[in-house]
Amino acid sequence: MTYLDKANAALQKALRVIQFLSPVISLGLFASRIAKIVRLGIQITHSNGAVLGILAAAVAYTLLAMIFQFVVKHGGPKIFRWLMMLLDLLFVGAFIAVAVLTRPYGGSSGPCRNQNRYLATAVRGAGQDCNLPWGVFILSIISTFLHFLTAVFHEVKDRRHEHQEKMRNANGGGNENGY
């Protein structure tokens, strides 16, 4: 394994760890906001449930992907790498949805969004932190880029494996240096 391969593997593992931490922090922030709203007796909206569901699914997926990446050498079988790439791209879309739902000044799960001004004032007055969705919004944008980068790494890794296999076959089955 060359220095470049080791650096690439370390970068991919670091991306997975950051990918895991981002939805965990987002889920914690958003769940604390929802808990405060529920304690006040206000019913949560469907969009709040959707954000919680997406974040919980992202935590589960990134945890499994991170464990798999630390345990399996060379990314596993090709079909599994393609599945991981597909899931990463699906989570790009999911985090775009979270960003849209929690966007400031218009997202249905955005900062202190409420149709009833009295209830919105009561929520703010009861210690509701209206800045929590800002953190979720920013982390969802970061997670979008992280999942996109990971999907690109899967494709690059597949191309590199194919190139190395061609080189081995061209060199008579030796290693990639031809020895």
Image (cartoon, rainbow, N blue to C red):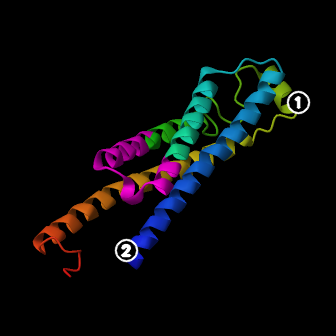
Three-letter code, disc 2: Met
In which quadrant is the N terminus drawn?
bottom left
Residue 119 shows up from this direction = yes
Q: Secondary structure at mark 1?
A: loop
**Residue at screen point 31% across, 49% down:** 77
Based on the picture, tell me whether residue 33 belongs to the magenta stretch. no
**Residue at screen point 49% across, 67% down:** 10
Write the start and end of the magenta stretch as one range.
65-90
Q: Is residue 90 above or below residue 138?
A: above
Based on the picture, tell me whether residue 88 belongs to the magenta stretch. yes
Q: Position of residue 18 (x, y in %)?
A: 58, 56
Q: Residues within 10 Å of mark 2 (few under 14, many from 20)?
A: few
| Mark linked to residue 126 | 1
Q: Nearer the viewer, residue 45 or 175?
A: 175
Q: Residues within 10 Å of mark 1 (few under 14, many from 20)?
A: few
Q: Position of residue 113 (x, y in %)?
A: 70, 29
Three-letter code, disc 1: Ala
Q: Residue 36 falls in which quadrant of the image?
A: top right
**Residue at screen point 74% across, 43% down:** 131
Q: Secondary structure at mark 2?
A: loop
Give the labeled residue for mark 2.
1
